[in-house]
Image (tube, rainbow, N blue to C red):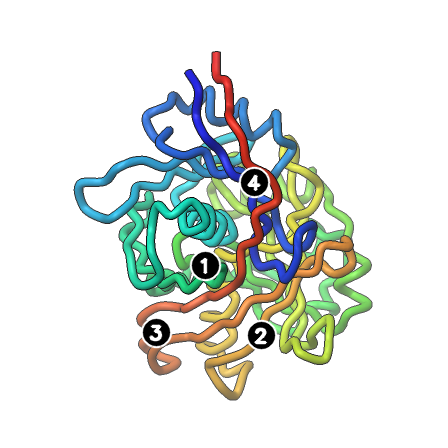
Amino acid sequence: MDYQFDWVDAFAARAFGGNGCAVVHDSAALPAELCMAYVCETSLVECTFTGPSDVADIRVRYFLASREIPFAGHPTIATVAAMRARGMVDDGSLTLETGAGIIPVTVSGTRVTMTQIAPQFGETVPAGIVAEAGSISPGQIVAPPQIVSTGLPFCITVLRDRAALEALTFDHGAFQRLATHLGHSETDLMEPFWVVQDGATDAGDTYARLLLAPPSPAEDPFTGSATGAMAAYLWSHGLIGKPDFVAEQGHTMGRPGQAQVSVLGPRDAITGVEVSGNGVIVMSGTVHFP
């Protein structure tokens, strides 16, 4: 079975920045085991597999090396950018069928804007439990960590400063304890999303990190789904004065990424989050599946 693919760096101004995703076209019917094996082969965090939809313009399936997930941000940017580069979609509006629902998207050349679904605010987590997962002291956390989802749940955790952000080290055992506290198995909880309200560059307003558990790579260069959840958290909790800002991630990895973010609706009734970024094609070719 042969399928066409594009390897795209999302939220990147240039190749080898932002976060890479391999987009395998017309492949949404493939079995999950084969999709996960492909992600392992690429050593990327996530890959997408597209196909026709009865309820939207395109169906998109999102895979980590360990499992299928309902939605992911940088792969959404990558998928639409890849299809636009191939002439499979035109500039303008389209919709994606995902496990998290229908995602509206607009595209203009290499620029893609997705509207993530209205946030779901979950449990507030004791700072001490979350801090252990990042090997830092609870005093470095300056707001109550909370599970938030705009399609995929993350524990949004605001840190005091860049020094705390850069000191993070993933503790696998502590992450397991966090999952147990929340009543999850380790395989159905995304890791804490750590953020400071200070950009990596003068253009940025926030800077974040996502440390990952095996078999994924150790760190995610840019996390679009968590960026949406983080934006909803900051706006809802009154931690930002305006709903529009620039989010940055990946700079200390040598893979700088940037997104323009807009939270939709008032603080107490958010209807969605727009997250916008560029997608740069790095390579294209044919996948030969067994």
Q: Which residue is mark 1?
A: 123
Mark 2 nearby-residue class (10 Å; few <14, some 14–19, many ≥20): some
> Of discs 2 and 3, which sits in the foreground?
2
**Visible residue check, residue 210:** yes
Q: Which residue is mark 2?
A: 246
What distance separates the C-alpha of mark 1 from that of mark 3?
18 Å
Mark 4 nearby-residue class (10 Å; few <14, some 14–19, many ≥20): many
Q: How many marks?
A: 4
What distance separates the C-alpha of mark 4 from that of mark 1?
36 Å
Q: Which residue is mark 4?
A: 7
What distance separates the C-alpha of mark 1 from that of mark 2?
27 Å
Amino acid at pointer 1: Glu
Above or below 185: residue 221 = below
Answer with mark 4 or mark 1, whichever residue precedes in sequence: 4
The percent position of residue 2, horizontal first and vertical second, equals 44, 20
Q: Secondary structure at mark 3?
A: loop
Horizontal placement of 208 versus 253: left or right? Answer: left
Mark 1 nearby-residue class (10 Å; few <14, some 14–19, many ≥20): few
